[in-house]
Image (cartoon, rainbow, N blue to C red):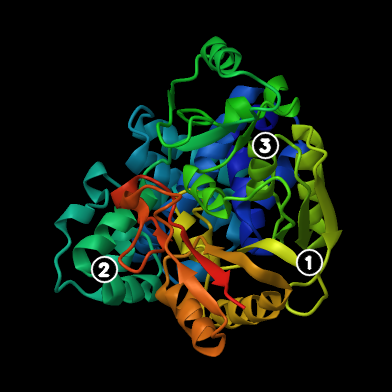
Amino acid sequence: MDLSSNARFHAVKILTEFDRRNQRLSDISRDYFYSHSFPPQILSTVTYLVQETTRWRGYLDYLLSKRFHGRFHKIEYLLQNILRLGLYEILFREHVPKYASVNEAVELARLLMNEKASGIVNAILRQIHLSDRPSIEDLKRDDPLEKIAAITSHPEWIIQRWLHHFGFDNTLKLCAWNNKIPTFTIRRNRMKVTRRDFESFLDQHNIQWNREVIMEEFYSIDQVAILKESREFEMGYFSIQDLSAGLVTLLLDVESSSTILDVCAAPGGKATHLAERLGNKSTIYAYDSDVVRLQRLGENIERLGLSSIRVAQQDATQDRYPMADVILLDAPCTGTGVMAKRADLRWRRMENHVEEMRSLQIRILSHMSAFVEEGGKIVYATCSLEPEENWGVIDIFLKKNHHFRLKRSNAYVSQQFIDIRGALHTYPPDHGLDGVFAVILERTE
C-alpha cells in the first residue's frame, strides 16, 4: 500500500489529530495539507472522508460500541478512527464494495499499528451490514433520548435542547439538514471580475452553479475543494461565504461617508463583503482579539485587493474604540446554525458553552454600545440557533439601555427571513441557508 497517495491514510491521520488536539477541524486539516503534498483529486477525497466520518461520528461510535468487547472510547485514537472510517465507508459509500472497505481498513491497522489491531478491525467490520444504516425518519416521539441522539448523530445535550425549543419534527428536520453533504455558496468579488467572466470561469472548471436571486454576487456550487485550489481563488476573484452571512451585511445599510467598525471581524467575511459592495471607497475599521485569526483576515484582504479596511488587534469587552455611525458586532457564539458545514462543532461544543457565550456576548454588546454616535446603530449577529444567545441577549441589553431601540430588518432583507419580532433569523431546513440571527439596534440619544 502506497500510503503517500492513499486518501484513507491521510483521512485517518487528520481525524486522529483532531481527537488529540480538540481544535477546529478546518485548522487541523489546513495545517496537515500545508505539510503534505498530493494531487487535487486526493485532496478532495481526503476532505470528503474527514468531514463525513466526523458528521456521522455519533452514530458510528454507537454501532462500534455495541460490537466492541470492552470500552470503545478507551482504545487508542488511531484504532478508533480506522474503525470509524471503515464503518462509514461500508454504510455510506455504496459505490465501494464492502470487502474493499474492510480490506483497506485492516491493512491500515496492520501498517500503522500491529497484527492484533488489524484482527480487531477485521472482526468488527465484517459484522456490519447495509441494514445497519441509520433511519432518522423511523424515529418516534417517545423514543429514548439516547436513541434519538445516536440515530441523528448529535450529542444528547443538543438534542434535548432542540426538542425543548423547536419540537420533535423541527429537531429531526434540523438534524437531517446537518447530516446532508452541504451545498456551498461563493461570493464573486465585483471589484475584480465581471459576472460574465466569472460564470465563464465556473463553466471552464465544470462546476455546476446557480446564481442566487436574492444577492446576485452569490453562487451556489457543487464543488468547493477544486475551486479553493484554483489560481482564480488566489487572485481574489471570489470568497467562500454562505448567503446568510451576506444577508447580515445588508442590514448595515451604510453610506460611503459613515464611520464603520467591525469589532469581531476575523477572518473577515462580512468586512470584505461590505468593502466590495461599497466599491472599496469607505474606510472600515476591522478589529479582533485573536492574533492568528487577524493574520487570516489580513491575508484575505490582500488576496481580494481591498485597500479600504484598516486592521488592528483589540478586545471588544474592554478596549477603547473610535466613535462610529455603524458597528457590526458579529459575536462569538456556539455556532449551532452552521453545523452542517462545520461537522466538528457538534462534538467540540459542550452544554455549558451556551451560558459562557451568552455572558460574553452581553459583555461585548454592553461595552461597544458606548461607541455609537447618536442616530447610529449596532448590528448584533450570531450564527447560533440558541434563544439565549439571540433574543435572550437583546432583551437583557434593551432592558438596561433605554437609549437604544429595535429597528425591524424587513426594510433591508426579504420578509421570508424575518421573525415575528423583526430580526433576521434563518432556520437551515426551512430556508436552505446556514442559521443566522441579526438585529438592528438604533441609538436614539
Residue drawn 84% across the image and 63% down it? 313
Up/down of 71 relative to 51, above or below: below
Label 2, label 1: how far apart the Cα atoms are: 40 Å
Where is residue 153? Give x, y as percent.
Answer: 37, 59
Q: SS at mark 1?
A: loop
Q: Is residue 184 above or below residue 112?
A: above
Residue 263, visible in the rendered structure: no
Going by the numbered disc 3, the residue's amino acid type is Glu
Q: Nearer the viewer, residue 128 or 337?
A: 337
Q: Which mark is residue 289?
A: 1
Mark 2 vs mark 3, CA separation in Å? 47 Å
Query: Where is residue 110 drawn, in percent x and y?
Result: 59, 44
For residue 276, the mark is: 3
Return the residue at label 2. Answer: 147
| Mark 3 or 1, closer to the camera | 3
The reply, left or right, for residue 189 in relation to residue 417 is right
Residue nearest the viewer, comparing 435 with 77: 435
